[in-house]
Amino acid sequence: MVNLERGARDVNGYRQSCHNVLDNKDIGRLNSEIEAIQADKSVFRFNEGIKTGFSDRKAVIHVKGDVSPDLNSTHPRDLMSERAVLAHEYYGHYLFAPSEFEQGDWRDEMRASYIAALKTPNLSDEDRKYLMLDAYERAREAGIPLEYSKKARGIIYGF
């Protein structure tokens, strides 16, 4: 059995590799996803940076190969669509910049997924659910199990 450090997640693929280069077809499809969530396309930079994520320093969102899901995983973070990942970065990080938290802080990541689940237009119910589950998983991974809010329960369980 693998012994993981506290806070590390024991899931399968961690999405696709950030080393996968997005080609013109991928970028066109992702631009359509950005339009669907009504985000500002000028904020997104393809095949730049280390991985998909918001750069506090540059105030842009880098989009790499890890924007694509790992459908062999069971973790909501791995399963959410490209659209949901883009929503997490845009509605959850970009629109909250500058963050009061250090980059990667579980509270910043939890808020990003929570807000994206609530505020992003044109997300599927499944993506809203994955984003909300991811939000609470961020807290659990940090050793802080939180009870679902009423809004979270409604998104996760469909009521």
Image (cartoon, grey):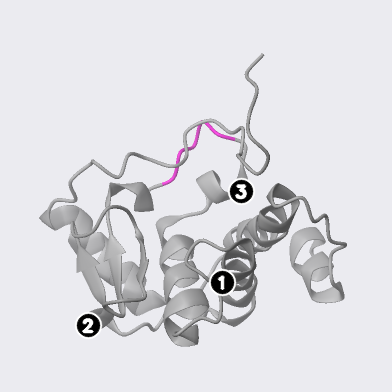
Q: Name the residue under label 3.
A: 76
Q: Residue at x 56, y 71 (%)?
A: 112
Q: Which residue is drawn at 45% across and 61% down?
A: 85
Q: Viewer-proximal residue, 50 or 36?
A: 50
- Dot in front, 2 or 1: 1
Alpha carbon separation for disc pair 3 and 2: 28 Å
Q: Is residue 100 above or below residue 8?
A: below
Q: Where is residue 148 in the image (x, y as percent from the top left)?
A: 84, 64
Q: Viewer-proximal residue, 73 or 157?
A: 73
In this rendering, would 105 be left or right of 14?
right
Q: Residue furthest left?
A: 24
In this rendering, would 128 be left or right of 69?
right
Q: Residue at x 64, y 66 (%)?
A: 110
Q: What element carries label 3?
A: helix
Q: Name the residue under label 2.
A: 42
Q: Position of residue 109 (x, y in %)?
A: 57, 65
Q: Which of marks 3 and 1 is nearer the N terminus?
A: 3
Q: Mark 1 points at which residue?
A: 112
Q: Does the magenta stretch include residue 72?
A: yes
CA neighbours of label 3 inside 10 A, class few (<14), some (14 to 19), many (20+): many
Q: What stretch is highlighted in magenta?
A: 69-73
Q: Viewer-proximal residue, 66 or 138?
A: 138
Q: What element carries label 1?
A: helix
